[in-house]
Image: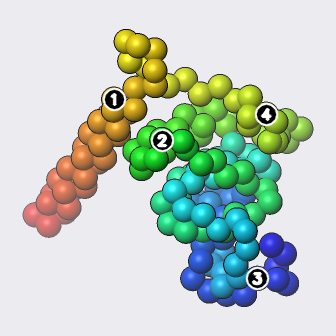
Amino acid sequence: MYERERVAGNTPYITATANNNGIGYFVDNMNATLERDCISVNRNGSVGYAFYHPYAALYGNDTRKLRPKYQSKYVSLFITTCILKQKEKYGYGYKMGTDRLKKQKILLPVNPQGEIHFEWIENAMMAKELNQIIQLIHYFDNKQQ
């Protein structure tokens, strides 16, 4: 969406920035890219950055939108982290185009049957989230003393 087309509003518009969870603007425009529970991957600009969007958002041309087949906040956050960890190999002259993104390898834990172990991923990410919350509580408790 070009600047002249943007109308200020409340809908997040995802751009190829590394900041603000990829949100470049808040708009009142609508188009076919409106979707929620997606992962955006920057293919231009801040190449290789990835963000999870549990809220409805619009997506710019310099990002690619991934729709995980297994719908889970925690699995999406895990996959986002896996993509983000590989961003260093992309940059000027070696952009993460659609074809490269489709070929990108993401190693995920598997169960004894060789299937992606979604339950393990969810449990690991929930434990990580809980640990972060506990650390914040301790931080603020110590700040108040």
Q: Position of residue 130 (x, y in %)?
A: 24, 46
Q: Residue at x 72, y 51 (%)?
A: 64
Amino acid of disc 3: Arg
Crowd rating for badge 1 (residues with CA inside 10 Å; few <14, some 14–19, many 20+):
some
Element marked by disc 1: helix
Residue 129 against residue 9 in the figure, above or below = above
* Residue 20 visible in the picture: no
| Distance between mark 3 and mark 1 Cα atoms | 42 Å
- Tags 2 and 1 in contact by the CB under 8 Å rule? no
For residue 6, the mark is 3
Report the Cα–Cα distance between label 4 and label 1: 28 Å
Q: Residues within 10 Å of mark 4 (few under 14, many from 20)?
A: few
Q: Residues within 10 Å of mark 3 (few under 14, many from 20)?
A: some
Give whichever of discs 2 and 3 has the lower sequence position: 3
Whether residue 36 sits left or right of residue 144 in the image: it is: right
| SS state under label 2 | loop
Which element carries disc 3, helix, strand or loop? loop
In percent of width and height, residue 63 lies at 73, 54
Along the line of sight, the residue nearer the viewer: 144 or 69 = 69
Quarter of the image for residue 61 reads bottom right
* Residue tagged 2: 70
The amino acid at mark 1 is: Trp
Indicate which disc residue 101 carries.
Answer: none
Q: Eyeballing the image, is 114 above or below 118?
A: above
Q: Quadrant of residue 125?
A: top left
Residue assigned mark 4: 100
Q: Which residue in the protein does label 1 denote? A: 120
